[in-house]
């Protein structure tokens, strides 16, 4: 079978990594937190505390609303890319290089601008209990290679949209301690476009061969997954506060369909054309596809300390169990058969072997005047990708550094506006892509069985504004 289908899980993770946090995460769910490079989780200044530490809801009187909009300008460019076809080999043997893949070797794979909204609402029931609801977008991005890229058999285009609905309740135990628990309902929609090397299955006498009759599939799927969040906040004294926030793993069973489009050259001869008949026999017009994934749990430790009336400092350390994405399998309803039939099956295997990671953030706030507070922060975000040989073309992820500036302006006693700008520097990366079954630890797999390399240069800018109101 001459197809490499990157699974829905990889598309999700590739998209989210380009949404400017390492691994899965979008990176920021609050503009007030963004202005400190997400170091201010212990602050509990507005309703967005639902995401960062929901126990902070007990610090908010009455009913509070926060609505935010982030404009993300990602830049992920690849260059110096190479791709090679491979030749058939006996089962268990490594397929040798058969020749280069023709096509473009550089380009930009992200949109110029992405808009991401977030909404939060809290309501104080009494002096002890506060309830809240968060609706936010943890993953949102699109990636697209040129249709004639030398890496087209790995992945050509992706799109991802997710939304979390997070009802939460917080309890004030006493003047120093508060706790919270919430439920997270996460909806994910994912699509991808993937090219297939149909020509490799066409005999040379029919004008076939590698790259002569490329086709492609468009795959889409969606699912609801459920998890929970826990939080604790401790006012050590009037100047110092510390907290812990835990967000659970969420399991998804993404189910959808794969629709095939075959080469117009192969179909030009009509229904009786030998090439068209052969290619159509290898791939159905449409079939079911599914993949199971688990988004990782995370644990955050954070603190804030007021140096004086005007200056506050923040810190956050977040651990994420990215090793949940160790392997993944995409299942097709119809087995694929290649010529020769030594590489057949219905499954695409992935072996990224991601590692657990940490992110450390430091920030501060300065009360410049009665209505205006200035804020800033820096962060180091460790990538879960272990090395170049496990970096997927859809996830040119690497360690990154956040630099954030912003502020808060009080419009009146009930309303305020947060604003923030972040620049994210991502270390240059290289991906050595090898989709041969044997290198994935399998004798059969759904794959075009190509190899390739590419260099990546990435960065991002995020501009955010948030309106807060207490009723």
Image (tube, helix red, strand yellow):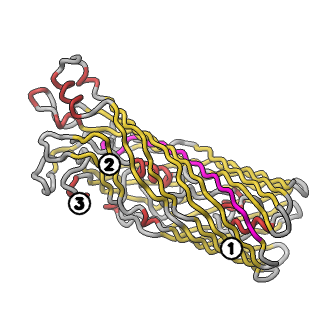
Residue 377 drawn in magenta: no
Would you call the spot at circle 1 few (<14 residues within 10 Å), some (14-19), or many (20 or more)?
many
- Drawn side of residue 106 relative to residue 447, left or right: right
Query: Looking at the image, can residue 405 be seen?
Result: no
Residue carrying label 2: 81
Residue 60: x and y in percent read 81, 64
Secondary structure, mark 2, is strand
Residue 363: x and y in percent read 68, 70
Magenta residues (range): 153-171
Residue carrying label 3: 441
Tell me where residue 37 sits by quadrant: bottom right
> Magenta: predominant secondary structure element?
strand
Residue 127: x and y in percent read 85, 68
Residue at 22% in and 34% down: 282
Residue carrying label 1: 232
Secondary structure, mark 3, is loop
Spatial distance from mark 3 to mark 1, Cα to Cα?
44 Å
Spatial distance from mark 3 to mark 2, Cα to Cα?
25 Å
């Amino acid at each position: 079978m001459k197809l490499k289908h990157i699974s829905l899980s990889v598309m999700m993770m590739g998209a989210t990594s380009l949404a400017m946090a390492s691994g899965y995460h979008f990176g920021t769910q609050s503009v007030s937190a963004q202005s400190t490079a997400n170091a201010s989780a212990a602050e509990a200044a507005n309703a967005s505390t639902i995401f960062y530490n929901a126990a902070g809801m007990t610090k908010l009187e009455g009913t509070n609303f926060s609505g935010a909009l982030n404009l993300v300008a990602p830049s992920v460019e690849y260059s110096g890319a190479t791709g090679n076809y491979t030749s058939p080999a006996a089962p268990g043997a490594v397929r040798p290089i058969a020749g280069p893949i023709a096509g473009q070797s550089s380009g930009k794979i992200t949109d110029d601008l992405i808009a991401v909204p977030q909404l939060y609402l809290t309501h104080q029931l009494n002096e002890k209990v506060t309830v809240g609801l968060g609706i936010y977008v943890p993953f949102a991005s699109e990636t697209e290679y040129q249709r004639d890229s030398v890496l087209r058999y790995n992945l050509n285009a992706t799109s991802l949209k997710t939304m979390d609905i997070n009802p939460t309740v917080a309890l004030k135990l006493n003047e120093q301690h508060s706790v919270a628990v919430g439920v997270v309902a996460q909806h994910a929609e994912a699509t991808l476009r993937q090219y297939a090397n149909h020509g490799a299955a066409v005999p040379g006498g029919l004008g076939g061969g590698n790259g002569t009759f490329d086709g492609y599939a468009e795959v889409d799927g969606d699912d609801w997954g459920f998890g929970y969040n826990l939080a604790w906040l401790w006012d050590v004294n009037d100047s110092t506060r510390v907290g812990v926030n835990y967000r659970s793993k969420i399991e998804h069973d993404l189910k959808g369909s794969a629709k095939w489009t075959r080469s117009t050259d192969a179909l030009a001869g009509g229904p009786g054309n030998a090439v068209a008949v052969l290619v159509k026999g290898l791939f159905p017009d449409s079939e079911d596809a599914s993949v199971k994934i688990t988004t990782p749990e995370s644990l955050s430790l954070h603190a804030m300390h007021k140096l004086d009336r005007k200056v506050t400092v923040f810190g956050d350390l977040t651990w994420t169990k990215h090793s949940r994405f160790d392997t993944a399998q995409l299942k097709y309803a119809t087995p694929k058969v290649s010529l020769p039939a030594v590489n057949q099956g219905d499954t695409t295997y992935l072996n990224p072997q991601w590692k657990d990671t940490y992110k450390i953030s430091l920030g501060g706030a300065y009360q410049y005047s009665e209505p205006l507070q200035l804020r800033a922060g820096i962060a180091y975000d460790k990538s879960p990708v272990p090395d170049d040989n496990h970096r997927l073309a859809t996830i040119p992820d690497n360690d990154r550094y956040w630099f954030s500036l912003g502020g808060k302006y009080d419009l009146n006693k009930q309303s305020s506006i947060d604003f923030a700008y972040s620049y994210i520097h991502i270390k240059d990366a290289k991906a050595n892509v090898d989709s041969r079954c044997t290198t994935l630890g399998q004798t059969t797999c759904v794959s075009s069985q190509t190899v390739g390399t590419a260099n990546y240069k990435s960065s991002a800018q995020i501009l955010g504004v948030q309106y807060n109101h207490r009723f």
